[in-house]
Amino acid sequence: MSAAAVSPGLRLWGAYVRWSARQPVLASLVPFVPVLVLWAAVVQSGIFPRVFLPGPIEVVEKFGTLMANGILPAYLEDSVVRLAAGTAVGLAIGIPLGLLVGLSDRAYRVLWPVLLFFQAIGDIAWLPILLIWFGFGLTTMIFVIVYTVLFPVVLNTVLGVRSVPLELHRAALSLGASRARVLWEVVLPGALPNIMTGLRNGLGFGWRALIAAEIIVGTSGIGFLMFDARRAGSVVEILLGMAVLGVLWYVVDSWVLAPIERATGQRWGLVTR
Amino acid sequence: MPSTEAETGTYTIAPMRRPGRVAGAAAFVVPLLALLVIWEAVVRAFDVSPRVFPAIEPVVKAGIEATLDGTLIRHIGASLGRIALGTLIGIALAVPLGIAMGTNRAVSTFFTPLLRFFSVLAGIAWIPIATLWFGYGFGAITFVIFNAVFFVVAYNTLLGVTSIAMPLRHAAASLGASRWQLLSEVLVPGALPNIVTGVRTGLGFAWRGLIAAEMIATNVGLGYMLFVARDFYRTEVIVLGMIIIGALWLLIDRLLLAPLERATIERWGMVRAA
């Protein structure tokens, strides 16, 4: 039979594929195992000096010490609070602005080119002048994140608002809905999938902006941890910082943002089509 | 009727009837000119200190001065050179790798979480270690751009290849397509819209990474120009740099990336949907 010709390795692989289809969460962790093993092997082989590339065990040990002495939790909290505060403000400005630009032809004609231009300048290019205005501190960092989150949210909200078909507006109006109700029950839900996409993009950029701001402003946070370690030449902490950043964002993205996006897409996506 | 949406649009707004090229450009430029007027008026009315925000004239002067003594060209050239090199290497490595991983479903499900993890980290988070590995300068910055583009493009290529309907691949194979034909006539064209989207996103990260890296790790380039000007409170140079950064990105995005994306999606997206 053909099954006899299949090598045991391949059969194991087949078993893994069948298992992973049933355990999606665990299956997304398994691929990291060979990467860690490979990393440890490269470090063991001594191709690169240990100072340049420490092994996974040293990074885990460092994680333990920094958790124990409270530095890592404190920095992590700083970074997450900054990101959350900046995002909240960005959404609070971005969604109303997007609704305005999306609904009013006049506002669109005046503001759209301006929005595109300021979006193009990019968050990080604002850092030097922000440092002059606000100094090295929290305001500067929050400003950068708000700026970064704002534009993807505004631009996508506009797209979303404009994708709501005219018939739905008319139907709601002719059924006697007030303008405010049309906004609340037709336009906003219709634009929600796009708003979520905007938020996700904005957070992707905001996240990077935060790291850059923390490196340059340098008072606390994961970005600061990494760059401070770089100054001291300690690669272990840099790698630890990268791992923490990656894991944190992975968790936020796949456990918070993606489900919300999927839910709004499923709930409202059909309405906008 | 969903199909009439493009013609009727929403009320009050309406995806405006496409104006001519000149009128379109004017509609884009006029609000920006208005912004310039507001800028000048505010600076004059409130007598803003040049150490806080410059008037228009010093910015223009700084621009002319920097152009004449050649520093501006040098900074722009350095930035564009780095981004071009990093991006080209990134795309050249990411596309073949993405396609290779995408051809087998089991291999692609294995690599997807890895690529997602690294595309999340791509760009700025690599600055500290890149400067340690390559030293401050050209190598570190190009590496940051390279990996911003590489991971995002590889991830999107992988998504693109896996999104090609299996029946299409089977059909091509059963019609006697060779491996090479399958690659060049089914896989690459099918993944192209995703690849281009990946390039656009990756370049967005790379551009920001470039500016950040230049502030931290070099002595030439637009980011460096801004950051040094900060030390001397020369806001006119900072604002000049910001305008140039914005204009350059608009040019790259509108003249290079957006048309490319539109062309591939129109050309190949339709093919897939039909």
Image (tube, rainbow, N blue to C red):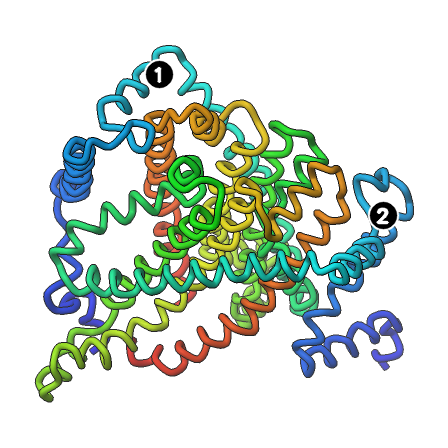
Q: Chain of mark 1?
A: B
Query: Could one spot residue A172 in this view of the protein?
Result: yes
Kind of element beneath mark 2:
helix
Quadrant holding the C terminus of chain B: bottom left
Q: Are the residues under marks 1 and 2 on the same chain?
A: no
Where is residue A143 drawn, in percent x and y?
Answer: 40, 50
The residue pinned by badge 1 equals B67
- Residue at image x 63%, y 59%? A74
Residue A42 marker: 2
User: In the rendered view, does A175 fall on the left or right side of B218?
Assistant: left
Mark 1 nearby-residue class (10 Å; few <14, some 14–19, many ≥20): few
Where is residue A200 drawn, in percent x and y?
Answer: 45, 63
Residue B237 quadrant: top left
Where is residue A37 drawn, in percent x and y?
Answer: 84, 58
Up-down relation of residue A161 to residue A268 (above or below): above
Q: Amino acid at mark 2?
A: Val
Q: Chain of mark 2?
A: A
- In this view, the residue in front, B200 or A33, is A33
Query: Could one spot residue B190 in this view of the protein?
Result: no
Q: Residue furthest right?
A: A45
- Residue at image x 65%, y 63%? A247
Up-down relation of residue B128 to residue B138 (above or below): below
User: In the rendered view, does B146 fall on the left or right side of A116?
Assistant: right
